[in-house]
Amino acid sequence: MFDHPGKQLKDFGVFIFLIMVIAATIIGYLIGAPADHGLIGAGIGAVIGITIGWLSTIVLIAFGELVENTTRIRELMEEDDDNDEHEETQETIQKPIEQPNTLVSQQNHEKHVCDKCGSKNEVDLKFYEENGYWICDQCGYWNTEEDNDE
């Protein structure tokens, strides 16, 4: 009963659509019958029932599709996890932990003041030399060589 909820929601959406069209047609006929406009009332009821039923069915079918896709994604992820478990442990054992070279990183950085907000920033000199600008950490302003010359 609970094996495929997405498909069941989609089937239920179609069932609701049919019930709403039939119910709206009957209600429209009953409202129009006392004034001898039963067929017109039934027609208006059918149009309203089809419209409302169609909209509610779209929502139910879309939700059912979402449930089906989520279930499928979960199944695929579980398959990948089962396949990748052994590979991850092998990679973790074989790879040494890399430590950053703090001397090199300190030598390749310089403090600059942002022209827009005035905050002090640690600027990567290699990036600055290659691109001709650096980006402020505080305001995101692109400080260029021309800005710094002024």
Image (cartoon, grey):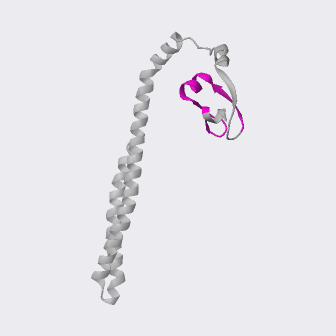
Residue drawn at point x = 41 percent, y = 22 percent: 83
Residue 33 rendering spot, x and y as whole percentages: 32, 85
Residue drawn at point x = 32 percent, y = 77 percent: 44
Q: Residues in magenta? A: 118-145
Judged from this view, the residue extending furthest toward the left is 39
The reply to whether residue 1 is visible in this rendering is: no
Q: Is residue 135 magenta?
A: yes
Whether residue 95 is situated above or below residue 150 in the rendered picture: above
Q: Quadrant of residue 73?
A: top left
Q: Is residue 19 magenta?
A: no
Q: How many marks?
A: 0
Q: Quadrant of residue 124?
A: top right
Residue 5 rendering spot, x and y as whole percentages: 40, 46
Q: Quadrant of residue 127?
A: top right
Observer-nearest of 38 and 65: 65
Q: Quadrant of the C terminus?
A: top right
Residue drawn at point x = 36 percent, y = 76 percent: 27
Whether residue 65 is situated above or below residue 82 in the rendered picture: below
Judged from this view, the residue extending furthest toward the front is 150
